[in-house]
Amino acid sequence: MMHIAMVSGEYPPRWGGIGSVVFHLAGHLASRGHDVTVITRSHQHATPQQPGVSVLHVPWLKAPMMFTRSYGKHALTELRRLHQVKPVDVVHTLLPLVSWTAKEYRWVEETIAPVISALNGSWVGEKEGMKLAAKHKEAATWKNPNDLAILLTGGWYARYEQAGVEASAMCVAISDSTKEEFNRWYRPPADWDCRTVLYGVDHKVFRPVDHDHEEEQLAYEALRKTYGAADEAALIGDANTETPLLLAVGRLVARKGHRTLLRAMPSILKEHPGARLVIVGRGHMRRTLMKQAKRLGVAHAVTIQPGMSFDRLALHFRSADLVIYPSYYEGQGLIPLEALASGTPVVTVDQPPLTEMIDETVGGLFRCGDAEDLARAVNHSLSKPDQRREQTVLGRQRVLDHYTYEHNAEAYEALYAELVD
């Protein structure tokens, strides 16, 4: 068994994509008998505990982008101390939220343990995604300090990703398109060792609704009634409902494509007047999005909810008829998998990495940034209830076959062992 040190800028109670992945991956690795220590940023709220997982908190500079470097330096110091107390067998870094120089990577490899760096998308990709979103009239980047920092300094901080690519013993991309992205923008050496492991989701939390379970059925009914999507068919989970519930989950920032989704709503409501859209996410754009909904005359059918607990979010996923994911850039994108695990079909953009997970057998695709094509894909799905029933089963099975944390833990365990050997 190994002692694995995971260096991650996100960890609960920071439930971002990386934070969620590290939490579950660490827990599953520990359940397989390994000792796991997570080195992450300090937080004012308590960190959830898991058997076999230790969490060490380090200081960090509370400034956009700059925190990755300050956190990285403090994480190095803590990693050195940890190794002296309990020798580390392998170091797992989560890029791009930790910034180390090539010299620092080499120091870790020479004095502590081999480094495996997970490539969770790139700053260059984030920057290009924001440019693409702006081209399609999403919100101005300057409204969000974090997005503005990425736009202005992403090129500078990309050099730390370059160091990770060149100096890590092994890299693991979270999708084939992310691997291609790093090949294209960072031009790694010819002997670059990079594998692909797509992240999974918690299929026990994200699962289909059990209409035979009284308490769960009551919660399902209450949620549907809250959003006015509760005709007789909907309340018994029949896909042939005239009040379909549409769900979009993601931070309220430009590259997530929420304004494109709102522009599609008039055409969706024209064919399905009883449809209701719920957007779940935190961010600076809430007021902007609600103003847009009012201008478009669809505010009566749109609700924006802030972030919520996993259990509450899971209830939304399993209660919806369709999840829509209009993002302009993702390293992988976990929301579509959480939807499929919940038995809910997904409509998303027709570009990688989303097309590595979603196709017509489990949902629908539309041209990125094209509101009318988005509306077409949603209307097509809503008009085919029998097809959505089939997609519900196939989507859940796809997750169970390929995209679980059990799969992830097994894959990473093999990669760690390869490095240690």
Image: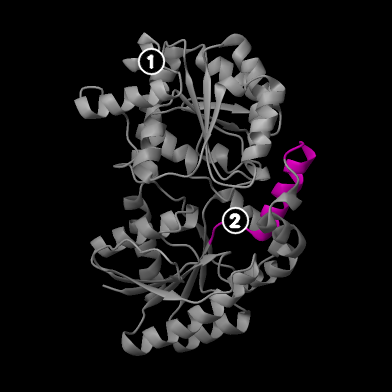
- State the quadrant of the C terminus: bottom left
Between discs 2 and 1, the one toward the N terminus: 2
The correct choice, above or below, for 285 with respect to 382 in the image is below
Say left or right for 12 vs 185.
left
The correct choice, above or below, for 193 with respect to 289 in the image is below
Q: Is residue 198 magenta?
A: no
Where is residue 28 drawn, in percent x and y? 30, 58
Which of the numbered marks, if any, corresponds to residue 34?
none
Type of amino acid at the residue the image marks with label 2: Gly
Which of the numbered marks, if any, corresponds to residue 121?
2
Type of amino acid at the residue the image marks with label 1: Ala
Quadrant of residue 339 within the rendered picture: top left
- State the quadrant of the N terminus: bottom left
Q: Which residue is at 55% across, 81% downward? A: 73
Where is residue 261 drawn, in percent x and y? 63, 29
Which of the numbered marks, if any, corresponds to residue 234?
1
Q: Which residue is at 37% across, 10% downward? A: 233
Where is residue 262 drawn, in percent x and y? 65, 28
Where is residue 74 drawn, in percent x and y? 51, 81
Name, please, the residue furthest toward the right.
Answer: 135
The correct choice, above or below, for 319 with respect to 151 in the image is above
Q: Which residue is at 76% across, 45% downward? A: 140
Say left or right for 331 vs 79.
right
- Range shown magenta: 119-138
Q: Main secondary structure of the magenta part?
A: helix
Evaluate whether residue 359 shows in this view: no
